[in-house]
Amino acid sequence: MSSANARQSYKGSQLGIVIGIDVGTTFSGVSYAILRPGQVPDVLPVTRFSGGSTGVHKIPSVIFYDDKLAIKAIGPSTTVDSVRSDAEDHGWFKSRHFKMHLRPRGMALKTNGLDIGELPPGKSAVEVMGDFLHYLLVETASYIRESHANGADLWSQVKDRAIFVLGHPNGWTGREQQRYRNSAILGGLVPDTVEGRKLVRFVAEGEASALACLSDTTKQVGSRFIIADAGGATLDISSYEVSKSFPVELQQCAPPDCRFAGSVFVDRNGLKLLKKKLQNSVYDDDDVLEGLINDEFEKKTKREFAGDSEYGLLKVGDKRAMDHNLGIRNGFLRLNRDELSECFSMSVAEALDSIRSQVTVIRRKNETIPVWLVGGFASSPCLLKRLNDSLEPEGVSIQRPDTSLEKAASNGAVLHFLNKWVASRVFQASYGITRLIPFDSSLSDHKQHSDLIQRGKDGLCIGPVFDCIVEKGTPIEEARTYKVPYTKEFFFESMAKRFTAEILVYDGDLPVPTWFEENKHKFRTLCKIEADLSDVCIEPFPRSSIFDLYFFGRIPDAFPQAEFDIKLKFRTTRLESTKLEAKIKWEANGKTKYKPVSIVYPK
């Protein structure tokens, strides 16, 4: 099935453009499609960036700032020797791995000791990302103007209505998307207006890679497969089933996984190895060792090592460099197979564990499960061989698709907009709220938590407990609304006007913990629901009760009470990956009423 056959002609009435951006932890890329009415769009990569060579799909996600926070070098120019020399001479700040500063706060992520580095003093992660997105926008505009016939006129026609699809790791939700969208605004991709914000869309990197792979292959209805997107910092694992062949339609069939197990961990382990082997030598200098890792190990040794050769070579100097005690001959340091294999061990172990977990969920009987390995780290012959050696006997086939491994995520981001291929998804975590429940003395669990007993209006209560609204792995149903019943007393009318309820997330495996206080560290806040409930209260607010409380310390027997439902709906649309909607429902004088709420994500 070709990309053109899988996609439909553009139904819009005017010329447009969709730009897919994959900002990776270590490398980034951009793809785009010109939207011409009545024509099938072609997905094209940006292959030329200022400061770098032509024909590259990925550039370093690195920025050099001076002490006034002016950008001195960005992207491919940061690897130029003269620039690196200037950076050292002038003390420029090197910002890298800045994407990881946008990761979910409080999420139970096993970072495996990844040092994500510091942000430039006086710059937030949103601002640094904004600087990088601005650079990608400028480079994309320049590439289109120079690569297309009448390119300057073409860009001038589409630039103000360009649609941007930003890829992000599995597990990023509302808060992270909100911050990413703010970066796009700061970067000048879209204006800070309601309509401007709608021009920024999101897609999980694993899903984007799946779409890119499917554009170049054919899958039978009912077949299941796994995407292993091996990037710089993370390994994103997603599972899908083909529910329709033409046009292609997918169903997510397991909660996606995200592991910190990308190629930077191989580099980190390589640095540890070099520090040990070259200790007390002329090479035993932090800057020298970092240079060997960045210039030689990452670009050559790591990428050439397949795991079956007796040794690998690392260039440390010219042909005159010789030191038999260190294993250096003709300018090359010899690293034996066991040493190099150990550099890959953690990443391979995490990948195997994640893939096996997905296989356990999606496999039917003894069917062979194909795993498509994509992303920059997927080009490693060692990673491919070790995954195949371990998983092939278990009926799991590791494959690298024909599509370019480096541009899979950015191409897939464009395809996410062009085609609604993923028809249904599953919840990646469990969602709920905390509440008090009636105390039941016959339950041993309640007796064991007697310190949590409180006196309520209708008797003894206990809690807070986590009231799960929807469990991890549940299919997201477009038409389903989740009801959260609420009864709330308010001391003052001002409290009713500023009602707030937190929607919490539990990322761990089932079952979900019941008792919130002792498991508080396992939860994170997805968002807050804010609303004015002053007109929802059953009784008016008596002025006397306020005076009694303020001036005499007397607590009234009862306060105005509101009984209502919070209605939640999780939508999956062709424009967003997963989006939360909410409203308040209550009964008044025999009529059902609704009111909107504000959804506020943590800053």
Image (spheres, helix red, strand yellow):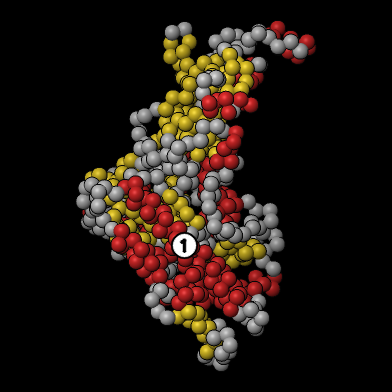
Is residue 393 shown above or below 337?
above
Location of residue 107 in the rendering, given as x and y in whole percent from the top left corner: 54, 45
Q: In this view, does 249 lie to the left or right of 408?
A: left
Residue 21, above or below 563:
below
Residue shown at 59% from the left, 55% from the top: 128
Which one is nearer the viewer's eye here, 284 or 532?
Answer: 284
Q: Which residue is drawn at 58% across and 78% down?
A: 277
Q: In this view, does 71 lie to the left or right of 477?
A: right
For residue 71, say whether it is visible.
Answer: no
Residue 319 vertical placement versus 188 (above, below): below
Residue at image mark 1? 347
Question: Residue 404 lies in what quarter of the image?
Answer: bottom left
Q: Percent x, y for residue 256? A: 41, 48
Q: Could you tell me how many numbered marks the image carries?
A: 1
Q: Residue furthest bottom?
A: 320
- State which quarter of the image contains the C terminus: top right
Front residue (pair 29, 237): 237
Q: Which amino acid does label 1 sit on?
A: Ser
Name the one closer to the observer, 100 or 415: 100
Task: Locate residue 523, reporting x and y percent.
Answer: 55, 39
Measuring 59% from the left and 73% from the top, which residue is drawn there?
290
Query: Pointer 1: residues within 10 angstroms few (<14), some, or many (20+)?
Result: many
Left or right for 290, reference 257: right
Q: Residue at x 58, y 61 (%)?
A: 96
Decide if residue 117 is in sight here: yes
Quadrant showing the N terminus: bottom left
Dot 1: what SS?
Answer: helix
Q: Where is residue 341 in the image (x, y as percent from the top left)?
A: 46, 71
